[in-house]
Amino acid sequence: MTAGPATPDAAPRDVSISFAEFDDDPTPNEPRTVRLCLLGFGSVARALCELLAAQERVLAERHGLRVLISAAGTRHGSLLDPAGMTPAAALAAVGDRPAPPQAARPAPELLAASGADVLVELTVMGDLSGVAAGATPYVPAATGHVLEAFRLGMDVVTANKGPIAWTWPDVSTAAAAAGRRIRFESTVMDGLPVFSLLEYTLPDCRLLGFEAVFNATTNFIIDAMGTGRRYEDALAQVQAEGYAEADPSNDVDGWDAASKAAALANVAMDAGITPADVEHESLADVPLERIVAARESGRRLRLVSSVWRETAEPGDASSPGRGAAPFTGRVRARLRAEELDIEHPLASISGESLGALLHTDLMADVLVSERHALVPQTAYGVYADLLHLCRTS
Ligand SMILES: NC(=O)c1ccc[n+]([C@@H]2O[C@H](COP(=O)([O-])OP(=O)(O)OC[C@H]3O[C@@H](n4cnc5c(N)ncnc54)[C@H](OP(=O)(O)O)[C@@H]3O)[C@@H](O)[C@H]2O)c1
């Protein structure tokens, strides 16, 4: 969903990028130029540049758009060309280097120098070990990037769940105050349109709660353990196959899934929670015997994120929406290992697939899932968000 501002006359509206700002003298036959500042230039940013390059003709002919990169930055390097370079040229300029070739610049400096229309925020959520130890509320670096972009008059697209999961009130308030928009479809299900589904395709339908399998790395580990491998061996196998990071702690300890649950709950249920409010357990604490026993009894163990209001039990969508005040109770969230009956809609979510069972008031239960939650799908979600911003201007 878009965080957009309340207009002075209080009429809700989708605040748009004005393309009149982009080109001095646009003509109907000349594509309008949209310039991006990419913060983070890892897997998703590179896949996005490849996708934009592959779609260049479609963007021009179908949408009248020319998308250029005016800056790209990481903590270790940068690339700056305020006039804008094609996505293919940006990729070529970075090549196989781990970071863009010019000296690193602080994010606010790069953003300001870029003159971009849209910040595409693709940095990482960061180290949550301090949060696990009960430190003060966590503020991802990306939140600072997003707020600075709004201050500079830019809209934002991000796949980074940090700002939405940890600091949604600040981010949405700042967007409203600045008259800018932020879109974040790829934060929760790697490009599968869950926010857009609720925002546009199910009008007036309210989300009452949900259950979801949100993390593919732990799916792979559980699948491997289901064949009798110990946790450490299963993790090593999944890492060797490229399905787990060298440091998989955010996945295994539940922070990734908890952050996705918080992000969806904050935006679609006005939950006002952070991932620290999501009770969660680590997959490392789930005994092998439990996973194997579930499989032998015809069930499937899954790490399930559940979000519900205190007025209803987790997964109970029967009364809310038809009774009184189902939208006022405090939102609760947890992530725990559950043995699902083989008939359960989430039992078949395994490996690189993700799924969520959404409980709504007007459409009852809606199951959304994707078979391949991989980097190209994440890049596509960012692309779709960008296109949405451009097409609704
Ligand atoms: N990969 C996926 O399929 C996927 C799916 C859904 C969502 N996402 C989200 O999308 C984002 C990008 O993912 P990715 O796979 O592209 O990650 P990645 O390959 O690890 O790349 C992250 C990039 O961000 C840079 N970076 C990290 N912290 C930074 C900071 N504070 N300031 C500036 N640059 C910073 C890193 O470079 P330096 O180390 O040089 O700073 C690197 O270029 C993440 O938030 C991730 O959770 C990814």
Image (cartoon, rainbow, N blue to C red):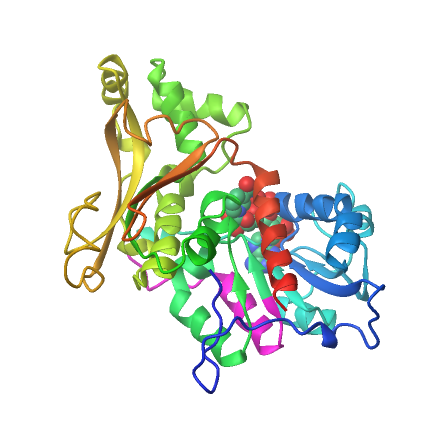
Asked if residue 211 can be seen in this view, the reply is: yes
Q: Quadrant of the C terminus?
A: bottom right
> How many numbered circles are shown?
0
Q: Position of residue 226 (x, y in %)?
A: 34, 17
Q: Is residue 184 left or right of residue 252?
A: right
Q: Nearer the viewer, residue 184 or 162?
A: 184
Q: Residue at x 45, y 69 (%)?
A: 171
Q: Position of residue 147 (x, y in %)?
A: 53, 72
Magenta stretch?
Answer: 134-155
| For residue 119, above or below residue 228 | below
Q: Nearer the viewer, residue 272 or 316?
A: 316
Asked if residue 101 can be seen in this view, the reply is: no
Q: Residue at x 57, y 74 (%)?
A: 150
Q: Is residue 103 left or right of residue 206?
A: right
Give the image quarter of residue 158.
Answer: bottom right
Q: Nearer the viewer, residue 199 or 159?
A: 199
Give the image quarter of residue 205.
Answer: bottom left
Q: Position of residue 135 (x, y in %)?
A: 32, 60
Q: Is residue 294 left or right of residue 357?
A: left
Q: Residue at x 40, y 37 (%)?
A: 355
> Does the magenta run of residues contain 145?
yes
> Does the magenta run of residues contain 255?
no
Q: Position of residue 105 (x, y in %)?
A: 69, 65
Q: Residue at x 52, y 49 (%)?
A: 186
